[in-house]
Amino acid sequence: MAGVSSGKQIEYPFLERLIFGNRGIVLVLFALITLGFGYAASHLEINAGFRKQLPLDHEYMKTFQDYEVEFGGANRVFVALMDSSGNMFNKEFFTALEAVTEEVKLISEVDNARVRSIFTPNTRFVEIVEGGFAGGNVIPANFSTTVEGFEPTDEDFEQIRANIVKAGVVGRLVAKDYSGAMVQAELIPETAAEGGKLDYQDIGDRL
């Protein structure tokens, strides 16, 4: 006995006539759509860059983008000290700058080898002298504000000023008008306590 289907067949006579009655046009249309998608797919690029993970519309990120060319990566820290008198060549300012340089090094997430200020040994000058080249640290070895009883002279500051110019750090580590100086540092995510993620708020508080 033949089975009887209780389902009701739905018919779309108009749609069927439209499609099958215009098979050529429909095939051409699908071919054009396929070509269009193929052209669009050929221009797709895989981009897993760092920027794709950033909320670029956030106000903090907009500030970062404004100064990115001058200051570099997002894990770079800058501490600027400005002298209220407009002249950094005094004992109080150099005492503060040397102390800040050492304090920045004590932050566990900071790469000490990349800390830079005029007090760090990686900031050097080179000059041409009779017989070849000569160079050294911007801050002479006998200049240290941490030594008890040390009193820098005007000649000491003139020597440091000359070394700063020869080192080419004016406008980078030292203000162009000599009203202040800067300490630069790089943060290392691998040193973070949990999962290699830096706690920027905590680092900011310690700074």
Image (spheres, helix red, strand yellow):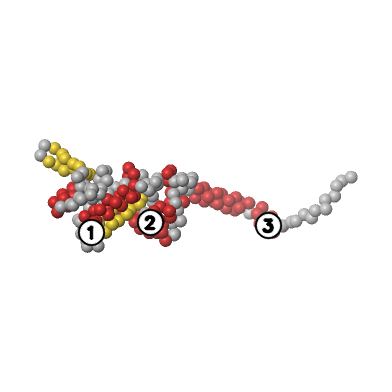
Q: Residue at x 34, y 47 (%)?
A: 105
1 left or right of 174 in image: right
Q: Position of residue 12 (x, y in %)?
A: 71, 57
Identify residue for label 1.
Answer: 179
Q: Separation of disc 2 and disc 1 at Cα?
A: 24 Å
* Residue 171 image-quadrant placement: bottom left
Q: Helix or strand or loop: what does disc 1 sit on? A: loop
Residue at which label 3 appears: 15
Q: Identify which residue is drawn at 58% across, 51% down.
A: 30
Question: Neighbour class for label 1 at 10 Å: few (<14), some, many (≥20)?
Answer: some
The amino acid beneath tag 2 is: Phe
What residue does disc 2 label?
A: 64
Q: Amino acid at mark 1?
A: Ser
Q: Nearer the viewer, residue 170 or 206?
A: 206
Query: Which residue is painted at 46% across and 46% down in the image?
Result: 193
Mark 2 vs mark 3, foreground winner is 2
Inter-mark Cα distance, 2 to 3: 57 Å
Q: Which mark is residue 204?
A: none
